[in-house]
Image (cartoon, helix red, strand yellow):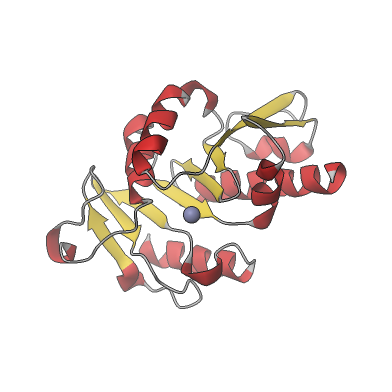
Amino acid sequence: MKEQLVETIRLYNQKGWSPATSTNYSFRENNQIWVTRSGVDKAQVAENDFITVNQLAQSVGEFAEVIPSAETQIHCDIYQLFPDTQVILHSHGKYPVLSSSVQLDSIQFEGFEIQKGFASQKTHEGTIEIPIFDNHQEMRFFSEQLEMRKSELEHSCFIIRKHGTYAWGKNLFEAKRHLETLDYLCECWWEKNR
Ligand SMILES: [Zn+2]
């Protein structure tokens, strides 16, 4: 898993989705959460940049001395709320960032073929609504929002305003599909509405 995820992170970095050491990525294997440590240039990310954390986003085991990124708590909350989740991807792609800057609580997409990229969708017909959370430095805020708005997370992703996206899945393939679908939809939305 680490090898494939490293490949994905480097690819996303080339797309400009993780400038200035931003973003973080995780996977769960044998009930253990592995997350990228903070401050890593994603062009250089390697398999030994993953650390193990517990459900409270505290580093454990041989990595107990490493301080995890604050956003690690968001990963832990998603794993707890959606037990089928095995991979979580966080991107700072600019189209969700731009789109969320002019929207309120959510963003809607209607009739795009790529809406089928979400595991929940069988057809391009209909409207998809993706929640937008306000950005916050206190991770407790996201924990509360995720729990309160769980029913809006049926498409396995959300946007943090002027910040980025989180997307997840039952494997890397599905998590990637969700993240790339959301990014593409936001790009179309932004180009159409600006
Ligand atoms: Zn971020």
User: What percent of the width, then of the height, locates residue 159?
Assistant: 57, 41
**Which residue does the image show at 65% across and 28% down from the upper left?**
129
Position of 67 with respect to 109 (left or right) is left
Eyeballing the image, is 22 above or below 182?
Answer: below
Eyeballing the image, is 17 above or below 40?
Answer: above
Towards the viewer: 16 or 144:
144
Instruction: Residue 31: name its quadrant.
Output: top left
Eyeballing the image, is 163 above or below 66?
Answer: above
Position of 77 with respect to 187 (left or right) is left
Instruction: Residue 142: name its quadrant.
Output: top left
**Which residue does the image show at 59% across and 29% down from the upper left?**
120
Towards the viewer: 134 or 129:
134
User: What percent of the width, then of the height, locates residue 180?
Assistant: 63, 50
**Which residue does the image show at 36% across and 43% down from the upper left?**
139
User: What percent of the width, then of the height, locates residue 69?
Assistant: 34, 58
Position of 12 with respect to 78 (left or right) is right
Is residue 84 visible in this depiction of the protein?
Answer: no
Q: Given the current orientation, which residue lies at the most extreme front position?
A: 137
Is residue 63 visible in this depiction of the protein?
Answer: yes
Q: Given the current orientation, which residue lies at the most extreme bottom position?
A: 44
**Quarter the N terminus occupies:** bottom left
Eyeballing the image, is 11 above or below 139?
Answer: below
Towards the viewer: 62 or 5:
62
User: What percent of the width, then of the height, locates residue 92?
Assistant: 57, 56
